[in-house]
């Protein structure tokens, strides 16, 4: 994709900045503020070009708009990425602190149009640093007045999505089902525990050997990363990076359902078409992983208490059942159905200034 293609993005706002001293480039993209201030995490990664960073931020911001709308949150969608000059682990602490300070300055200049939180390669401690410069931050550590990590609630939401999807797909309960979890990070690891407690038979894949060591002790079957798409399972749960299911992968998968915590699981629309043609039930990621937004945005931006967060998280399965009903009635993919539901719910919400 060329830079011209990326710049034709139809969102509301794009901010870019490059800092020669640190070598980092910064991108903030606000997709929509129709329902409220935009919210979305900060992702730190290496990108082959500025166009790649812009494209990633744009896709993720759009997904956040859908997530907020379909989940009934009075917020818009945004996202930011920090394009790093080296792998995150190789960046010295002093340099990283400066990068975060610069990013916070960018956010603060938007004066509340965009709120950020943790994402890939950023955490609560990083949000604490951002908060020293700007107030428009969620996901701070608990001892700094924040909600802390959203991993547990994200996993709980995906678990609710998994139960609803298994039932709708005719698989029954999770007891006895084979579930392949790709990525045993904070969310994937917790999801594995919940699935095991529900009686599922776990297959897991990760590039981190320490996580796999834990999985072996837990009695999981280890799947090599290059064998994930051809390993039979009842439910496939992508919980690492996005874009893992393209058209070719969709044609190879041997599973009944896909329910994961990763963002933008489908690499393209054609992948969703192939899954539907093959009878594989896909839970749209921006519905399934909304528990993280309920925990962070709900608590820190909207002032929700524990019960309100739990109520919204427990309704994720019900939302998916609505999505599946629209998909079947309209003869469309579940991803398209979820977008329809998001638009319907947004239409019944009061726009900012409306």
Image: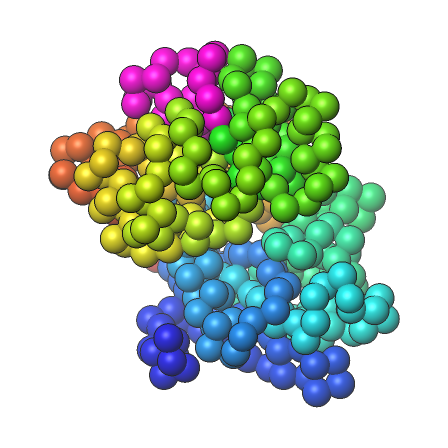
Q: Residue furthest right?
A: 94
Give the camera-side residue of 179 and 269: 179
Residue 309: percent from the left, percent from the top? 56, 32
Q: Is residue 169 a member of the stretch shown in magenta?
A: yes
Q: Which residues are magenta?
A: 160-179
- Image quarter for residue 208? top right
Q: Is residue 208 left or right of residue 295?
A: right
What is the quadrant of the C terminus in the image?
bottom left
Give the camera-side residue of 33 and 47: 47
Q: Is residue 142 left or right of residue 155?
A: right
Decide if residue 318 is in sight here: no
Decide if residue 51 is in sight here: yes
Residue 133: percent from the left, percent from the top? 75, 68
Above or below residue 249? Residue 6 is: below
Instruction: Tell me what residue is drawn at x 23 percent, y 36 percent.
Output: 278
- Image quarter for residue 319? top left
What is the quadrant of the N terminus in the image?
bottom left
Q: Which colour scheme appears in the figure?
A: rainbow
Above or below residue 3? Residue 116 is: above
Instruction: Tell me what residue is drawn at x 78 percent, y 53 percent.
Output: 125
Q: Is residue 200 a member of the stretch shown in magenta?
A: no
Residue 253: percent from the left, percent from the top? 35, 38
Q: Is residue 279 left or right of residue 146?
A: left
Residue 307: percent from the left, percent from the top? 58, 26
- Image quarter for residue 214? top right
Q: Residue furthest bottom?
A: 20
Give the camera-side residue of 300 and 173: 173
């Amino acid at each position: 994709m060329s830079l011209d293609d990326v710049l034709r993005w139809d969102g509301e706002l794009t901010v870019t900045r490059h800092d020669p001293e640190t070598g980092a480039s910064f991108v903030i993209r606000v997709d929509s503020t129709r329902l409220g201030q935009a919210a979305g995490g900060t992702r730190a990664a290496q990108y082959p070009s500025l166009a790649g960073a812009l494209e990633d931020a744009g896709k993720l911001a759009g997904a956040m708009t859908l997530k907020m709308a379909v989940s009934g949150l009075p917020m818009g969608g945004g996202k930011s990425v920090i394009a790093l000059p080296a792998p995150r682990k190789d960046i010295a602490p002093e340099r990283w602190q400066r990068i975060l300070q610069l990013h916070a300055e960018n956010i603060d200049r938007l004066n509340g149009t965009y709120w950020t939180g943790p994402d890939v390669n950023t955490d609560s401690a990083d949000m604490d640093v951002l908060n020293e410069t700007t107030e428009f931050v969620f996901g701070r550590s608990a001892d700094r007045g924040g909600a802390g990590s959203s991993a547990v609630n994200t996993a709980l939401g995906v678990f609710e999505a998994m139960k609803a999807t298994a039932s709708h797909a005719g698989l029954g309960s999770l007891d006895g089902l084979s579930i392949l979890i790709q990525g045993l990070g904070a969310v994937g690891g917790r999801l594995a525990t919940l699935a095991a407690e529900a009686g599922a038979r776990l297959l897991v894949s990760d590039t981190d050997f320490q996580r796999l060591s834990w999985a072996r002790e837990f009695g999981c079957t280890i799947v090599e990363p290059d064998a994930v798409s051809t390993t039979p399972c009842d439910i496939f749960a992508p919980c690492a990076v996005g874009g893992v299911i393209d058209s070719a992968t969709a044609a190879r998968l041997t599973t009944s359902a896909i329910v994961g915590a990763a963002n933008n699981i489908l690499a393209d629309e054609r992948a969703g078409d192939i899954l539907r043609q093959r009878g594989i039930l896909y839970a749209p990621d921006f519905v399934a992983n909304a528990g993280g937004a309920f925990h962070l945005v709900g608590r820190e931006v909207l002032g929700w208490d524990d019960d309100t967060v739990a109520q919204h998280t427990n309704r994720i399965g019900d939302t998916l059942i609505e999505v599946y009903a629209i998909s079947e009635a309209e003869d469309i993919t579940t991803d398209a159905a979820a977008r329809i539901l998001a638009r319907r719910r947004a239409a019944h919400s009061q726009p900012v200034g409306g």
